[in-house]
Image: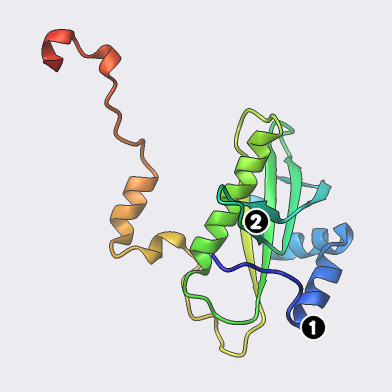
Amino acid sequence: MKKKSSTPTPHDATFRQFLTQPDIARDFMEIHLPAELRAICDLSTLKLESGSFVEDDLRQYFSDILYSLKTTAGDGYIHVLIEHQSTPDKHMAFRLLRYAVAAMQRHLDVGHKKLPLVIPVLFYTGKRSPYPYSTRWLDEFDAPALAGKLYSSAFPLVDVTVIPDDEIA
């Protein structure tokens, strides 16, 4: 994964300056989140989080903007991850998935018992229009339908504790 360090473009700096302000971020989310997701977000509870993540091999990487908020039901958490991109990246969907998983891990690490929903949003300002790549990470597989089935189903489990000993031998 590419490391993102300081803000490389004026667009990036402006993007960060505006969207790190909760009132502007709230307006952005009200406009750009799909209605079904917006309906479960309590936007009055927006809290800016660190977008810095460290992998097991101690490589650091950054998402642009990460907010946490409570659900409208009050029983869970949602994170909205907003990534600014000025050049197309054919693996952007996978990169956003990695950021989302890192945010989920951090959520568990601070003591929460359940995973939060993480809503990735790509804010694209590139010259090539429209954005040329899929924003669905499953489309990065050679067999997206099979990948979708695999990753939306329970994984195979071989539970030796419930197999009679005479069947194991």
Q: Look at the image and tell me in which quarter the N terminus lies.
A: bottom right
Q: Where does label 1 land, which residue? A: 10
In this picture, residue 99 sits left or right of residue 84: left
In this picture, residue 165 sits left or right of residue 16: left
Q: Amino acid at mark 1?
A: Pro
Nearest the eye: 158 or 23: 158
Q: Residue at x 85, y 69 (%)?
A: 18
The quarter of the picture where residue 119 lies is bottom right
SS at mark 2?
A: helix
Q: Residues within 10 Å of mark 1 (few under 14, many from 20)?
A: few
Q: Amino acid at mark 2?
A: Ala
Residue 149: image x %, image y %?
32, 48
Residue 167: image x %, image y %?
12, 14
Distance of label 2 from label 1 (alpha carbons): 31 Å
Rendered position, 25 above or below 166 = below
* Nearer-N-terminus badge (2/1): 1
Rendered position, 78 above or below 52 = above
Nearest the eye: 3 or 36: 3
SS at mark 1?
A: helix
Rendered position, 133 above or below 37 = below
Q: Residue at x 61, y 41 (%)?
A: 105
How many numbered marks are there? Answer: 2
Q: Look at the image and tell me in which quarter the C terminus lies.
A: top left
Nearest the eye: 162 or 72: 162
Q: Where does label 2 land, which residue? A: 35
Closer to the camera: disc 2 or disc 1? 1
Rendered position, 78 above or below 15 = above
Residue 32: image x %, image y %?
69, 65
